[in-house]
Image (tube, rainbow, N blue to C red):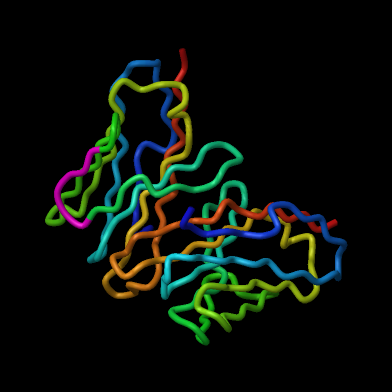
Amino acid sequence: KNEVEQSPQNLTAQEGEFITINCSYSVGISALHWLQQHPGGGIVSLFMLSSGKKKHGRLIATINIQEKHSSLHITASHPRDSAVYICAVFNTGTASKLTFGTGTRLQVTL
Amino acid sequence: NAGVTQTPKFRVLKTGQSMTLLCAQDMNHEYMYWYRQDPGMGLRLIHYSVGEGTTAKGEVPDGYNVSRLKKQNFLLGLESAAPSQTSVYFCASRGANYGYTFGSGTRLTVV
């Protein structure tokens, strides 16, 4: 079983819909990142969380340390949000390296 | 702008040729990483460094060497390229507060 599990693997939404991507992990963590990668593009860290909630524009990320769960929400989705979203954690046991989830491929259509 | 710079962005090699990928960061980060990304495989760690003069193996180190002679630079070398090393390579660096920055990637094709 992977240490970091994401769901869903693939997601199709219509423009304007509210989107949630979930991440569950089975290890103790120092921090969690939500990463975004557009097709053929680079990788950007959208959020780094160690507790609570962060918001940036239409994006919201939450983490529940006790439940070992994080969610990424996109409000009023837009076709430019189409990308792969990856949850990644710094395991407290190997704090120098990220452990990646398998990613969620999001397609937002008009 | 502060960040991670990778060179080159694209390269085509013949089997058996050698090359070096350069990663440079200007954020004074201690930790630096080299990943490869293949379709359906996600990001896999090749080598990493926890500070100047140190390197360590990741998940898929075979066929690659690295050096971190200066804190700001992390070099990835392919001594004898193979078609299996066709991939997109990403460099990243990590700050003390777990902030993580990726380079824009190098698309390498070995023919």
> Front-most of A4 and B89?
B89
**Residue positioned 48% across, 65% down in the render:** B26
For this orientation, the residue located farthest to the top is A110
B102 vs A101, left or right, is right
Q: Position of residue A43 (x, y in %)?
A: 49, 48
Q: Position of residue B25 (x, y in %)?
A: 51, 65
Q: Position of residue A106 (x, y in %)?
A: 44, 31
**Residue positioned 52% across, 73% down in the render:** B72
**Residue positioned 40% across, 66% down in the render:** B94
Q: Quadrant of residue B86?
A: bottom right
A57, above or below A88, in the image: above
**Residue positioned 44% across, 22% down in the render:** A108
A99 vs B89, left or right, is left
Assign the magenta stretch its main secondary structure. strand
Q: Quadrant of residue A104?
A: top left
Q: Position of residue A85 (x, y in %)?
A: 42, 41
Part of the protein shown in magenta: A50-55
